[in-house]
Image: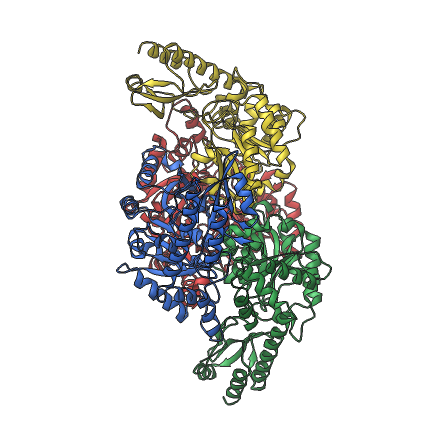
Chain colours: A red, B green, C blue, D yellow
Amino acid sequence: MIRFECDYLEGAHPLILKRMEETNFEQTAGYGADPYCAAARAKIQALCGGTDVEVHFLVGGTQTNFTVISAALRPHQGVLAASTGHINVHETGAVEATGHKVLSLPSDDGKICADQVRKAYEAHWNDKDHEHMVQPGMVYISHPTENGTLYSKEELKALHDVCRELSLPLFLDGARLGYGLMSEESTLTLKDVAELTDVFYIGGTKVGALFGEAVVIANPLLRKDFRYFIKQHGGMLAKGRLLGLQFDTLFTEGLYFEIAKRADELAMRLKQAFVKKGYELRYDSYTNQQFPILPVGHMEKLKEKYSFAFWEAVDKEHSAVRFCTSWATKEEAVDELIRDIEAL
Amino acid sequence: MIRFECDYLEGAHPLILKRMEETNFEQTAGYGADPYCAAARAKIQALCGGTDVEVHFLVGGTQTNFTVISAALRPHQGVLAASTGHINVHETGAVEATGHKVLSLPSDDGKICADQVRKAYEAHWNDKDHEHMVQPGMVYISHPTENGTLYSKEELKALHDVCRELSLPLFLDGARLGYGLMSEESTLTLKDVAELTDVFYIGGTKVGALFGEAVVIANPLLRKDFRYFIKQHGGMLAKGRLLGLQFDTLFTEGLYFEIAKRADELAMRLKQAFVKKGYELRYDSYTNQQFPILPVGHMEKLKEKYSFAFWEAVDKEHSAVRFCTSWATKEEAVDELIRDIEAL
Amino acid sequence: MIRFECDYLEGAHPLILKRMEETNFEQTAGYGADPYCAAARAKIQALCGGTDVEVHFLVGGTQTNFTVISAALRPHQGVLAASTGHINVHETGAVEATGHKVLSLPSDDGKICADQVRKAYEAHWNDKDHEHMVQPGMVYISHPTENGTLYSKEELKALHDVCRELSLPLFLDGARLGYGLMSEESTLTLKDVAELTDVFYIGGTKVGALFGEAVVIANPLLRKDFRYFIKQHGGMLAKGRLLGLQFDTLFTEGLYFEIAKRADELAMRLKQAFVKKGYELRYDSYTNQQFPILPVGHMEKLKEKYSFAFWEAVDKEHSAVRFCTSWATKEEAVDELIRDIEAL
Amino acid sequence: MIRFECDYLEGAHPLILKRMEETNFEQTAGYGADPYCAAARAKIQALCGGTDVEVHFLVGGTQTNFTVISAALRPHQGVLAASTGHINVHETGAVEATGHKVLSLPSDDGKICADQVRKAYEAHWNDKDHEHMVQPGMVYISHPTENGTLYSKEELKALHDVCRELSLPLFLDGARLGYGLMSEESTLTLKDVAELTDVFYIGGTKVGALFGEAVVIANPLLRKDFRYFIKQHGGMLAKGRLLGLQFDTLFTEGLYFEIAKRADELAMRLKQAFVKKGYELRYDSYTNQQFPILPVGHMEKLKEKYSFAFWEAVDKEHSAVRFCTSWATKEEAVDELIRDIEAL
């Protein structure tokens, strides 16, 4: 079985394992106060250019999402998000478990726009009984989205501007940020993301690390006491250096960007094969996730040899599915899959 | 200004105030352990017929909703409700503040149906990653709904059956229960409600009391330690007898039903006046809330003399509004309003 | 049975019932936006003298405590309180249910002192791993305390000063505030309380009202969006005027102070009778709660005719008990009890 | 600087890194549904002997504690724990953040006894207002405790029996379980722990793993839907095999026990050196943490070359400190420290 169902099927980039072995018997302080975290922080800060940012390392994405959101909101506030957003669908109500409503906005492709944010804000404040409703307190987006789609620089700028105007912190979930930034369609850099959001994170788990997400906080208000929140929510790794070491490695000589780019290129080869075969695409993705709509017979045939994710039934005879590449995807596996698609 | 904007504009039925005065200097135990609560409980139990129920008294509706829901759910569970449900829209995220997601189901008229519940349940359990999603753990409905609409006995029976089959407790918010049961279209009695739900409440605040909601629990699992939950959420009135006394009065000689019936009749007179005038109705309500769609000019004219609630803009020239009657509405006020509608 | 076990055995001062009856059919806006709330607010603000304060009305004490505390704290913060404090012992973990630890400080008489606050603060911040511990974020005191004891003006001033210095808001639970302010030992006025705390409340439930607590917020930071918190926690009474009307009555011509003073005087007569009889006192209270230590035989004898609260066993032959007077206690009842004590 | 301040200073046992490298490019299902987790589960189940247990893997200790506790309790319940317990002191109120009070019991050495549990339980249920107090719902102990002390089999049996009798699940925090079980004073095996608790965990982070805690649930009631709780609290590692692989390695050929035993032996050599030097011990520990009371001058001298944890000031001239050994401690480091102690 050759697996394409997600982007966390393998371990870590070999350079990471190598450095873990080399440093294994070094003694370091715990909880992120070690030289590897310091080095990784400095590299990320440098990539953020002129923006003054604070960097923290957490273990996983769900944890990062609810830690950031609950740290930013007061009890009567909720977070605006696409109805398809990860926090709204696939985190077992982790945000609600911290006491906050996810205020979902309709979205088909996974994105929301500045105008939706403004309308939701105004709908709240123009209601004479607004105290009876959850107050919008933050905006959550993911880039790329759960559907592989991307915000353009203009779109992100528009979200940034409306959020700044309305005093709503903008939070960007970058669980797959590398695949977004290195897409052939990307108009954004890490520096742009730092400038245009209040807080975001750089996903490691899905882009070369064993695990780990680097939270980057530009807004000074969101920094206050952030380490307490990490600890309270179980995100403070005792051997914090494991996180520092991984991000330090990924941001040495551009490794993070290089491996993400390669995965995107492999995904685009897959996309072309699907299109050439005449399949429709559920979402027009230029990142490492591809969503072809397959005739059910073809889907069953491919399942014999490949694993991939069922997304949704489109009609009785077609289903949308998801194929992911990653930093670890083998070129030969993609070649073989393309041959098998062509042969269907 | 003659007010019709809601059903809690006045104090309480005079008989309630009279009894409060008569008993004012009696010394009773606190927190609901007094003879008036006992008497009210007995009367409500009798009206529930053969169903063995436990009865508790709380101060208000929001408090009752989140107390019941959070008592019933485990932390990873959410409550299914109409998107228009009070808990989803107008309680400042009170359910989420107890850690639980409101799993909203689309609804235009405020009702949900058995099939929606079944589909939501199956969608959850058929997803291979269901542990990444909030598990449906309860069903919340309101009767009448926030839009004045009613469940028929068949509809409630169907909800009851699917909930029983799927082990989902069914909770009925009866903030306006009296107005529902006494509607000319009602096919339900209090006994039916007790039989067909796991827990419900009888609204006092909007039906003759100063304040107070009587929670009726049929499902033994939901009874366990319920008084702790009331206390923890601030719903345990020190002078609990005030609640007992009010419900005892309301359920003496059918007062609750009689005053609700009168309010419904006044509302139906208003409805007929709207229809006769040629207005569309936003919802086809047979209870104390009426939702005509008014030409904006007529709306402005009526505003000079009457207060009523803006509901939503229908188009540039029409708005849906809400007029409520209550146990306290004066017949003359309705007569005058009808004359003014006719004269528009 | 003549009851002395608590101070919420009766209804309300007759003037309150009278006004409720007089105004019963007036139509007013809901949720505290009515003229009675406005009038009561103005009277309380006037009594607070020069301090600029915001006033809100809630239904009960537990609700008020957790609403204020959870509005003031960020998620990683806790509230410092005497180990005997109501929030730490008798509210079913309501504060913890909002996510916050009660950081208890040892206390025998119910009071805490400025030095305890400073030491707890310093212990936190001097610990190199303070991010692993709950950060002190507020100080809670009650006046009178649950044991009937009082803070002197100097003690309250010292607490105020240390709280101001350490940026810890000071919250005073005044469920029995009237009995405290009117005690013959009191050195505090309502104006002092407003000046020396960030937020406090004036208890109505135990001092003449049917129910109700008036929250007075001096600190502007604690005012922001406070009505959302009231609504979210179920404390926003639909017919808010019931609260306004009660406090307006209580603060008309000094009624609140007058009835509290009378109760204190009756309690002091009881105290003298206990002392004269040779009983020790568990706490040296000058307010409406008295805590004599009775020989078990005497306790059993008194129980035949009077109800009072068991407090704690002191030794095999003696128990501390609590007798309360209130605004409603009858002079004849106190006379009779004193005679029976003397006759033991 | 030679470091002894805690037991998570280094990476992982080299066999773990070796296997991570060997398996790095294998493709496996995520979230713990991989063969390595299955293998580790089977090994742990075998060590638990006849007790039927379910095994889950989480990333860290704080996360594990609050996930287990909040899964077990209903909202009005709290967890009984020693006042010194990790959950009560060093987890930033993580348990309270899930809505539950830690009901602390006095303890000097870190242990609590069956009689304390019974008394707390009875004090709750014998209070006539028990609904106004947090209901005890679980018992938390740590073994070894935070002070290095151990429960004997008799003591654990007594706790088990009282918990069974009172229907309170017993939860054992085994963050350092290996060091406890392999102590020369231990009278417990892993099998005993499985038999005598409802749920416990086997700490990996401090005993040879990079990170990871294996939760072992014997009580069927606590198993229901446990994976939802892990996910909701951010503890479900995407690449779950990293946890499985580590525990599989640790429980292959007794590695876990072997490395823990060695660390205990090194700690006992340190203990003997302290005692021989005439120092008092703050706690009489037979595990990998040692707590000598040092003259301040000696403490300062040792600090020049060694790092260790300050515990508490005993008097002006003496401080209790903590030295830890671990699976990674070098024998030469211990030799050198002992020589330096002797030379003080």
- Location of residue A223 with respect to D155 vertically, above or below: below
Percent across and percent down for residue C106 are 40, 37
Residue D2 visible in the picture: yes
Of residue D294 and residue C247, the one placed in the foreground of this image is C247
Of residue B245 and residue A120, the one placed in the foreground of this image is B245
- Location of residue D190 with respect to A108 vertically, above or below: above
* Left/right of residue D234 with respect to residue A162 in the rendered view: right
Which residue sits furthest bottom? Answer: B343
Which residue sits furthest front? Answer: C343
Percent across and percent down for residue D206 are 47, 26
Query: At 45% across and 46% down in the image, what residue appears?
Result: C87
Residue D60 visible in the picture: no
* Left/right of residue A175 with respect to residue B186 in the rendered view: left
Percent across and percent down for residue B312 are 49, 72
Query: At 35% across and 63% down in the image, what residue appears?
Result: C254
Q: Quadrant of residue A114?
A: bottom left
Percent across and percent down for residue D173 are 52, 30
- Location of residue B323 with respect to D214 vertically, above or below: below
Of residue A243 and residue A232, the one placed in the foreground of this image is A232
